[in-house]
Image (spheres, grey):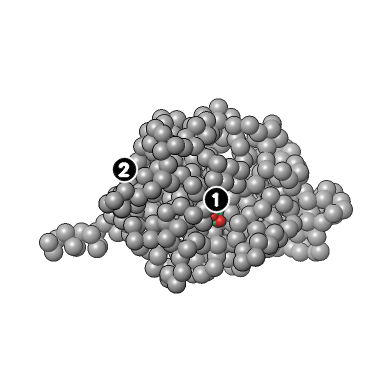
Amino acid sequence: MKKLLFLLLFVLPVIGFTQKFDLAKTPPMGWNSWNTFACDINEELIRNTADAMVSTGMKDAGYIYINIDDCWHGERDNQGFIHEDAKRFPSGMKALADYVHSKGLKIGIYSDAGTQTCGGRPGSRGHEYQDAITYAGWGIDYLKYDWCSTGELNAAEAYITMRDAIFVAGRPVVFSICEWGENKPWTWAKDVGHLWRTTGDIHNCWDCVMGYGTWSKLGVLAILDKQADLRKYAGPGHWNDPDMLEVGNGMSYTEDRAHFSLWCMLAAPLISGNDIRNMTKETLEILTNKEAIAINQDELGVQCFKMYDKGDFEVYAKPLSNNELALCFLNRGETPFTFSFDWKNYPVYDGVSGKNYDFAKTEYRLRDCWLKQDAGTTAVPLKATLQPHDVILMRLTPKK
Ligand code: GLA
């Protein structure tokens, strides 16, 4: 008995912790049903999305997780075990997971720390260990865990309970904390989850805040601005999550491209939220830009910071491994912005990563990640015009 207790209390969580670190060394990449389909989901959609992930080349670009969000649930049986909605998922979750796995992909699911999910389905409160065991039996690889109907629950404790349940269930699972930043998860979640939402839900607009009484949805810029002080909390295995992507969901081409670039710079999880069975060439081109993705997935795992701010013109810097650096020049405003950026006047010093880049001392080669072409060096000022809501995304490599 003592041995069993020792195993449960000490050994399994430690094994689980080791697995935790290895699962998300770089920000997770995948797809999630919520932004486009909300509760209108079924197994055919998930299967076809898995097919599209492969046939479009998104899988090759790094998108691995097919995540089912809210509303997959049926009811709990009389022993308390949760079942899928048999009308929408007639073949069952296990068969669906097997199908997704047969494509070389991984599958995610959604639950909630409270009594009900945000969509009014059964939450995991009081059933955490049962649910974790059920998910492991189905072959689930990723759990997004929401925060509706939680009353007076303590957030850190509630998420730790589910983390431990996942560890004991024994299947490696990426654990996505979704309490909208309300309890400052960046201060306690490093060893609890692999990613934590930092804000309320995203909305597919450039610069808006949509109020819904007690909660609001935020556009790209509003979310971007809320990440500023959080970068020191993120790193390999534990990421700030500024919410899923809205690329392909109604913003303009330049806005989508800027949104994607900024999420890459933020070392954000890249979870596409569009209908990938049915997307334009432009949307696919944005989502699969390998040069932008390489910035996001850089193994140093450092989130960007704003190194320059002049009205609507901002420059973000993201230190990369091998003494490389990513820069993103952003025009937030409504009119074109012409600039000349004289590198030697803007050395980059980063207290978080300890990386320094002095362009007066070292010359860097420039690579434009959207034009996908070399763009000279830092020896001469960068002169360019940025269209409204557009970016220039650059990779800088020291010249040998
Ligand atoms: C919350 C989350 C969303 C989504 C919905 C589902 O609003 O923040 O991302 O999961 O719940 O109901």
Task: Give the alpha-carbon distance from disc 2 to disc 1, as whole Å.
Answer: 26 Å
The structure residue drawn at horizontal position 29% and vertical position 51%, both measured from the top left corner, is 78
In the figure, is residue 103 to the left or right of 339?
left
Residue receiving disc 2: 137
Q: Badge 1 is on which residue? A: 269
- Where residue 12 appears, as percent x and y from the top left, is 26, 56
Residue 87 can be seen in this image: yes
Q: Are marks 2 and 1 in contact (CB under 8 Å)?
A: no
Q: Left of 327 or right of it: where is 25?
A: left
Q: How many marks?
A: 2
| Residue 101 drawn above or below residue 134 | above
Circle 1 packing at 10 Å, graded few (<14), some (14-19), many (20+), is: many
- Please say if 137 is above or below 15: above
Query: Residue farthest to the top?
Result: 55
Which x, y percent locates residue 304?
A: 63, 58
Which amino acid lies under the numbered mark 2 shown in the image of this protein? Gly
Residue 96 numbered tag: none
Mark 1 belongs to which amino acid?
Pro
Q: Where residue 186 sits: x, y (%)?
A: 51, 66
Q: Residue at x 54, y 45 (%)?
A: 39
Question: Can I make out residue 364 in this image?
Answer: no
Cβ of disc 2 within 8 Å of ligand 1? no
